[in-house]
């Protein structure tokens, strides 16, 4: 692997952490900086495609994240495109003050570099009901 790719991958891991912090902290300036104008949130089975403006509206007006952890963040770079995979052992939130329940699962984020600047253009999530168990059943060898 080229030295630049390793630097890009480390940068994408840090940007992913910054993005999660911005989401949890509802930091609009950071979100505007990190998210591409054409960002879309997808569900793994193609049952959800939420454009950036709608997603931000949900985040700032309806969703309150009460517990979230993101782990196993791994980045790969393919030229001007980066793919970041991660898992979330727990996500608990409310929507309009009503509990959404506990979820765990996986994210795949696609980042695009334009003029030397990375922005996330897509997140695909695979949500699984409940908190991740310690039984090992959720792990893939």
Image (cartoon, helix red, strand yellow):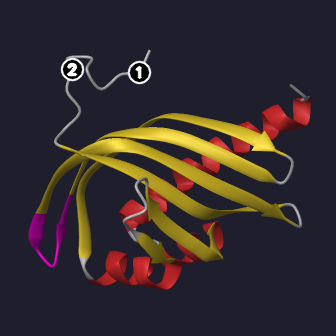
The residue carrying mark 1 is: 140
Image side of residue 91 versus residue 108, left or right: left
The residue positioned 62% from the left and 42% from the top of the image is: 13
Vertical relation: 27 (above or below) 111 = below
Q: Secondary structure at mark 2?
A: loop
> Which residue occupies 86% across, 25% down?
1
> How far across and down, in percent of the image, does residue 65 sit?
26, 61
Seen in the image, is 92 located left or right of residue 47? left
Callout 1 environment at 10 Å: few (<14), some (14 to 19), or many (20+)?
few
Residue 81, image x, y percentages: 77, 53
Residue drawn at x 87%, y 61% as measured from the top left: 116
Q: Quadrant of the C terminus?
A: top left
Magenta highlight range? 93-99
Kindly indicate whether the residue at mark 2 contacts the one at mark 1 (C-beta within 8 angstroms). no
Front residue of 81 and 12: 81
SS at mark 1?
loop
| Residue at the spot of label 2 | 134
Identify the image quadrant of residue 55: bottom left
Q: Is residue 24 left or right of residue 90?
A: right
What secondary structure do most residues of the magenta stretch adopt? strand
């Amino acid at each position: 692997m080229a030295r630049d790719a390793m630097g890009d991958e480390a940068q994408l891991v840090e940007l992913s952490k910054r993005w999660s912090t911005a989401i949890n902290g509802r930091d609009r300036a950071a979100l505007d900086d990190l998210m591409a104008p054409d960002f879309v949130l997808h569900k793994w089975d193609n049952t959800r495609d939420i454009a950036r403006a709608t997603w931000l509206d949900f985040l700032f007006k309806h969703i309150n994240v009460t517990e979230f952890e993101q782990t196993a963040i791994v980045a790969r770079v393919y030229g001007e495109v980066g793919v970041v995979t991660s898992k979330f052992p727990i996500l608990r939130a409310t929507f309009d003050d009503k509990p959404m329940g506990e979820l765990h699962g996986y994210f795949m984020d696609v980042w695009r570099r334009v003029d030397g600047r990375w922005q996330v253009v897509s997140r695909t999530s695979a949500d699984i009901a409940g908190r991740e168990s310690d039984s090992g059943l959720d792990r893939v060898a």
